[in-house]
Amino acid sequence: MPLRRFFIASTLILSPLAAIGFESAAFAGTTQDINLGAVVPSRISITSTADANSSALQNLLNLTGSQTTTEAKIADLTVDTNENSVNISATSVNNGALLNSTNGQTIPYLLEITQDGAGRYGGSIVSDLNFQAADGDYDLHILIPSAGNIKAGTYTDILTLTVASGD
């Protein structure tokens, strides 16, 4: 029995102390906020796969002199981005014309970018091309107005596409 009285006495003594200790911890008056954040870097790239038409444009030239514009898809484009939108623009070594470096004659052309597999709608001179795109696949078209009576020779140009944030 003396052991039982000891436990009862201990409980009576420790019980109020425990309650005070727990209460003071429960009513602590301070908090601390932890700010969380992340910076996600922008990812923007464009890849192109040239179509057979890009190096065989002679098949598009209307040499009859009639006012017919011919067109063809010349490349498949893939835009890879985590931006809401991007702008695709173009520049050309010969300012949007195929150039015969031997005689200086040029054949001007227009460009157009469309959704993958979609039809074309018109065309822009190279310096005015500004196509808003998202992550996905697109087609690049060339439009060549009637070439008329052009001189024989090799005509070339180098086209550069640039993709930049549209936001």
Image (tube, rainbow, N blue to C red):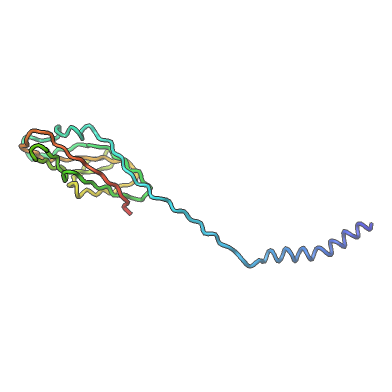
**Quadrant hosting residue 48:** top left
- Outermost residue, bottom direction? 29
Whole-percent x, y for residue 45 in the image: 33, 44
**Quadrant hosting residue 25:** bottom right
- Residue 107 or residue 122, whichever sits in front: 107
- Eyeballing the image, is 159 above or below 12? above
Whole-percent x, y for residue 62 in the image: 10, 35
> Position of 66 compared to 27: left or right?
left
Q: Residue at x 33, y 47 (%)?
A: 134
- Eyeballing the image, is 117 above or below 17? above
- Outermost residue, front direction? 102
> Position of 85 compared to 66: left or right?
right
**Quadrant hosting residue 70:** top left
Q: Residue at x 91, y 60 (%)?
A: 5
- Which quarter of the image is occupied by the C terminus? bottom left
- Residue 16 or residue 121, whichever sits in front: 16
Whole-percent x, y for residue 11 in the image: 84, 61
